[in-house]
Image: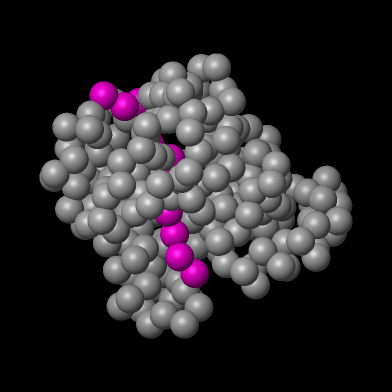
C-alpha cells in the first residue's frame, strides 16, 4: 500500500507516520506539508508545498497512491468562522478534490473529532464546519472515505504536540490518560491506535463511514 499523508508534523500525524513506517505492508509514504518532518526513513518521501489551495504544480507527484491519511487541522480557539472554515474546509477539500481526480481507487481517511455536527446547523461553530467538511468529503468519487472522530487522544512513543500549553497538559495528565484509555474506550484512544486503525480501514474497509473512538480502538 502506498500512502499520502497530510499533517505529518502534528501530533496525530506524527503518530500515523510512525505506524505507517513500522508497518511492513505500507510500501511507501509521501508526506505533504509546509515544512519537513525531520525524520529520515527509506520509506518516506516528502514534498514541501506552500499553497494548500492549489496542488496543480505537484499533481504528477500525487498519482499512484492507494490511501490518503489527512491529519491536518487547527484549533478553533481565537478564530472566527470565516478563518476557521478556510483553514479547515477549504484546504481539506482542495487536497481531497485533487486526489480524487488523480487516484479514483484511493481510500481517503479524515481526522475530525468527537462532537462533529453532521447536520451542519448546530450552535457550535467548529462542529458545523467539520460536519460540512465530512459531508462533502463523502460525496467525492473515492473508492471509500472514512471520517475518524476521536475524543481524547493520548500521545505515545515520544510524540509531542506543537502547542506548548497543550503539551504541558499531556505531560501532567499522562497517568490519567493512560487509565482512561483502558477503562473508557468511548472517550480515549492513542496516537498508536489511530495510526493502526487508519491503516487497517484502508486495507480492509469498515461497515461505518464515521468512526468514533470505540470504533478506532476496536480496529
**Residue 131: x and y, percent?**
41, 61
From the viewer's side, name the closer residue of 169 and 95: 169
**Quarter containing the N terminus:** top left
| Residue at 26% from the left image edge and 24% from the top image edge | 64
**Residue 205: x and y, percent?**
48, 28
Q: Main secondary structure of the magenta part?
A: loop
| Residue at 56% from the left image edge and 61% from the top image edge | 162
**Quarter containing the C terminus:** top right
Q: Is residue 98 above or below residue 60?
A: below
Q: Is residue 19 above or below residue 82?
A: above
Q: Is residue 214 left or right of residue 78?
A: right
- Residue 189 in the magenta stretch? The answer is no
Q: Is residue 20 above or below residue 171?
A: above
| Residue at 41% from the left image edge and 80% from the top image edge | 79
**Residue 55: x and y, percent?**
19, 47
Give the residues in magenta.
64-75
- Residue 65 in the magenta stretch? The answer is yes
**Residue 173: x and y, percent?**
80, 63
Q: Is residue 141 left or right of residue 172?
A: left
Q: Is residue 210 visible?
A: no
Q: Quadrant of residue 187?
A: bottom right
Q: Is residue 22 visible?
A: yes
Amino acid at each position: 500500500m502506498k500512502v499520502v499523508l497530510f499533517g505529518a508534523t502534528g501530533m496525530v500525524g506524527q503518530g500515523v507516520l510512525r505506524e505507517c513506517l513500522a508497518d511492513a505492508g505500507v510500501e511507501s509514504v509521501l508526506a505533504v506539508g509546509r515544512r519537513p518532518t525531520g525524520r529520515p526513513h527509506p520509506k518516506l518521501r516528502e514534498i514541501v508545498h506552500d499553497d494548500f489551495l492549489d496542488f496543480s504544480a505537484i499533481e504528477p507527484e500525487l498519482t499512484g497512491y492507494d490511501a490518503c491519511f489527512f491529519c491536518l487541522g487547527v484549533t478553533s480557539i481565537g478564530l472566527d468562522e470565516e478563518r476557521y472554515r478556510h483553514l479547515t474546509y477549504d484546504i481539506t477539500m482542495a487536497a481531497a478534490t485533487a486526489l480524487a481526480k488523480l487516484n479514483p481507487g484511493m481510500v481517503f481517511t479524515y481526522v475530525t473529532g468527537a462532537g462533529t455536527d453532521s447536520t451542519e446547523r448546530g450552535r457550535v461553530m467548529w462542529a458545523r464546519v467539520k460536519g460540512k467538511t465530512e459531508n462533502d468529503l463523502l460525496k467525492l468519487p473515492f473508492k471509500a472515505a472514512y471520517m475518524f472522530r476521536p475524543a481524547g487522544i493520548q500521545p505515545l512513543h515520544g510524540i509531542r504536540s506543537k502547542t506548548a500549553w497543550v503539551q504541558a497538559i499531556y505531560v501532567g495528565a499522562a497517568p490519567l490518560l493512560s487509565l482512561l484509555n483502558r477503562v473508557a474506550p468511548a472517550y480515549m484512544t492513542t496516537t498508536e491506535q489511530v495510526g493502526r486503525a487508519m491503516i487497517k480501514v484502508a486495507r480492509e474497509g469498515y461497515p461505518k463511514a464515521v468512526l468514533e473512538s470505540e470504533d478506532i480502538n476496536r480496529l
